[in-house]
Amino acid sequence: MTIRIVLPAAVCALALTVAGCGAGADERSTRQAAGVAAAPQATPGPDSSCPNVTASLRPSGALPAPTALPAGSTMDTLRKRGFLIAGIDQSSFPFGFVDPQTNVLRGFDIDLLREVAKAIFGDAGPTRIQFRVVRNEDRAIAVARGDVDIIAETMTINCQRRQSVEFSSVYFTAGQRLLVQKDGVADRADYAGGLPALPRDMRVCSVPGSTSIGLLRAEAPQTKVVESDTWAGCLVLLQQGQADAITTDDTILAGLQAQDHIFTIVVGRNLTLEPYGMAIAKDRTDFVRFVNAVLERLRQNGRWKELYKEYLGTSLSAEVPEPPAAQYRDSA
Amino acid sequence: MAAAVPISQAPGSGVPARGTGRSNGMFRPRNMSVRRLVRVGGTTPGLMLTTGVALVLISLLAGLLAVLAVGERADAAKAVATGSEPLGVKTQEIYRALADADATAAAGLLEGGVESADVRQRYQQAIETASRTLVQAASAGASGKVAEQLTVIGVQLPEYARLVERARAETRQGNTVGAAYLRSASKNVMRAKILPAATALHEMAEKRLSGDHRDATSTPWVPLSLLLISAASFGGALWFFARRTHRRVNIGLAVAGLATLVSIGWLWVGTESSRTDLDRSRSDGWGPVETLAQARFLTLQAHGDESLTLVMRGSDNGQYQNDFNDVWGRLVGVPARDGHPAVVGMLARAEQVTSSDPTTLAKVRAAQAAARDWEKAHKDVVDLYGDGKFEQAVALVTKADGASRVAFTRIDEALHAAVAEDQKDFEDSVRAGRQGLDNLDIGLGVLALIAAAATVDGVRREVGRYNRP
């Protein structure tokens, strides 16, 4: 049974991953009228401890051709150098990962970087990007210090990070959800109530130190928390019958679901909202505007949806959602 | 001879002529009552008889104890050669095969779903060797704690293999969860349960070997001292007999004393030379074998860690890289810094313990050279990985001509050859040590009987003179 959560269309556009967004307006209103699956809690939003955390710098006009980059700009410098240095993660399937069969780097984040490289160099050949594996906790400092030109690594835009780096516009909106085994007791439970409504003694797997496990412990004390040191490790526990559910960002869950797509399902509404952005040094505002222009083009020419289809498929929703709309501000 | 009579007929005696009158010269203690014996004991022939009995008893007892002591040592040396050493070798082989399987499974997964034939073969061989050796060790009459540890390994090994197969199957389908299965197999089963059991097993075997070795090489002080007392007594008796008879040396006692001295010399030389050989089996054989084997285990673990670092692709938060650094420090040593004392690497220790054996030393040196190459290659692996050049990093570790794999193989083979070399030294020395004890017990027994018989004969002849009319 698929849990459908009915949300206003505007939220639907933002929270792309929520099941039910593909449903027609009529169906939605009918269900709403019938009082089906009305979410008891407000949909979580982005970090509100600072104003407009997701508003990025507005692109300065249309995207220039690689041969017509403004002289002296960051992009011009990069083009002259010949390559982009990008911070990535190789273990975030399906955003940044090494294809286990070919040992080639792939992923939603990786392909976005290739699009940026293409906009600068005119091609995205293998020498155009020098990938650097940057640990999660080092992401902001690596950009601020200039070790890398740009980071695309499932990085949530928040106020604390905004103090040290500049973010692109939101290119993906993730949120914490649940992955359960199909055809078990777990998938027949009602997930509309969020974590507090989870069945008593349900064995939920999460990774110690993650924000997901913090929320789980705080909101669902009735469950039994099962720990694993990696998310894939949680899937192993689920498959070996030692856990009933996994909770973390739906982007990660999508990666897990894709590896066991017949027998697992991502359920429930977004418990948190994690807007992903690419991080760039604060003093490279021209590059931020340029990257935003690249993202804008991807949103409009359908490439974003292609990437979504390639890497997330139907793991989170039956249909490919609309890309998150960009929010801009004009000055740094 | 006539001169002896007045001396023997000391005041208050005069019994001998009567007492042994019908014994036609035969020494018959059975015919004497205790009272008579006491009375007789006071006379010269009586004293001679008493001395003779005591000498026979002491030399037989010393001989018996010497025979038993030699038998004990021979048994212990046999236990070293046929029991505890083969067990030690087996437990070492079990550990090596298991660590090899762990390292090779990780390397195999790195090659994507389909690993190269030689990697696959090495993994299978490692599992097979471990299983076979396990069965052999179990059927060799393992009991108690040894059987317990063997059971742990026997139960967990199929579970490990199952998880590795699942890891492989998932990876073949392009699922990154394969890495998590491998990690589960390696971390939760192999390193948490199987290898500790194998370590415990090996420690028990090593302890048993040490015990058997100690038993086989201890100096037999008790029989030695008894033999010495016995020899001294023969000396004293010879002196006493000579005094009382104004005669020459009593041939029987002299022969007995000589036999005792030969016993002492033979027992001392035999056990000492056997001890020297057995000690050499330890200093040039088993000791270096242990050190070399430890170095080999560290090499395998480092290889496994290097592969697992890549398999995990950073999701282990650098755990396997840290583990690699730790293992590497134990293998090649760490210079003193920040108040931490320097760590002597296992390879340096291997160099020390094999310094007297040029053949083995050359192999250890080859391993050290390969370790230096590996260190460079590993740095390249880490750099390539850090630069997202995953394919190239993997190639260094998995390809037959990859610098890291080549260096690892060189160390492993050099240490393997060194272990085999010292194992041979060990077996040769133990064989020599056992040969030193061969026939020693029979010889000592015969010598004790000779001493007793010679004593009887010597005393009989002497006492017999008193019975002549």
Image (cartoon, coloured by chain):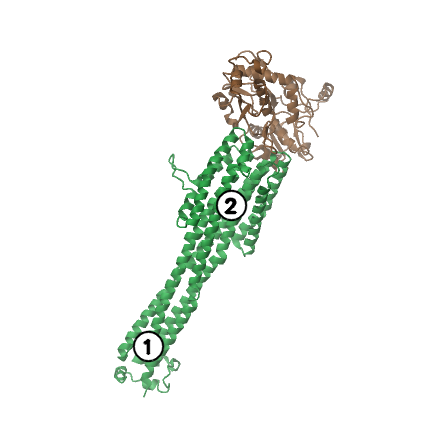
Q: Chain A is drawn in which colour?
A: brown
Q: Which amino acid does label 2 sit on?
A: Pro
Along the viewing direction, whichever of A125 and B422 lies nearer the viewer: A125
Secondary structure beneath label 2: helix
Is residue B447 toward the left or the right of residue B110 in the image?
left
Residue at 53%, 22% in the rendered image: A83
Q: Where is residue B164 in the image (x, y as percent from the top left)?
A: 60, 41
Q: Where is residue B452 in the image (x, y as percent from the top left)?
A: 38, 74
Q: Mark 1 points at which residue?
A: B251
Q: Which amino acid does label 1 sit on?
A: Ile
Label 1, label 2: how far apart the Cα atoms are = 67 Å
Classify B442 as above or below B319.
below
Residue at 57%, 47% in the rendered image: B125
Is residue B150 toward the left or the right of residue B234 in the image?
right
Q: Colour of chain B?
A: green
Mark 1 belongs to chain: B
Q: Give the quadrant of the N terminus of chain A.
A: top right
Using the rendered image of the protein, determine whether residue B430 is visible from the camera's viewpoint: yes
